[in-house]
Amino acid sequence: MGILDMVSELCDCDWHGLHSRNKLKKRRQLQTVEIKVKIDCEGCERRVKKSVEGMKGVTQVEVERKMNKLTVIGYVDPKKVLERVRHRTGKKAELWPYVPYDVVPHPYAPGAYDRKAPPGYVRNVLDDPVSSSLARASSLEVKYTTAFSDENPDACVVM
């Protein structure tokens, strides 16, 4: 809660002693929803974009055809946006499963690497409990890999 919200609550006087509905209403957060949808042509792109443009709370819609990615910005629920895209277009859609490869500690681990991923992206294995153990390094692995690292000043200079 910001300082302005606190001051406005202090100054808000309810003369009748009734609670206003605005105080009881929960505010939605501005969200960015990224969805993976197969987009083949300009017609598919237009159909996917039009499927979410009319939704209540949507402020901006972007479609990246080469990455098969739909980005929706607004005061929306991600599940509702996903269902709307599936229903209106008839296409298989899922939440964006990729993250930049810099975020994952071992991007070429069996669970993380995906040939279908766009360039510079790998699967988000940090949320998946099955694949996350493969993509994370144990302390023993980190110890041995940093022993021969060029960035470590106390590293072994065997080579």
Image (spheres, helix red, strand yellow):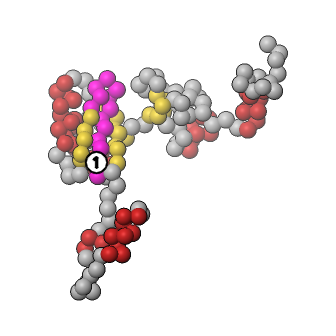
Q: Position of residue 76 (x, y in %)?
A: 29, 51
Q: Position of residue 157 (x, y in %)?
A: 82, 17
Q: Position of residue 73 (x, y in %)?
A: 30, 44
Quadrant into which the C terminus falls: top right
In this rendered view, identify the residue nearer to me: 103 or 109.
Answer: 103
Name which residue lies at 54% across and 34% down: 103
Residue 1 visible within the image:
yes
Residue 85 forms part of the magenta stretch: no
Q: Is residue 32 above or below residue 107?
A: below
Helix, strand or loop at mark 1: strand
> Left or right: 137 with respect to 68?
right
Which amino acid is tagged 1? Gly
Q: Position of residue 11 (x, y in %)?
A: 32, 75
Q: Which stretch appears magenta? A: 63-75
Residue 38 visible within the image:
no
Q: On the image, numbered disc 1 is attached to which residue?
A: 74
Magenta stretch, main secondary structure, is strand
Q: Is residue 31 above or below residue 136?
A: below
Q: Residue 150 sits in which quadrant? A: top right
Q: Please, which residue is most extreme toward the bottom here? A: 16
Name which residue lies at 29% across and 28% down: 64
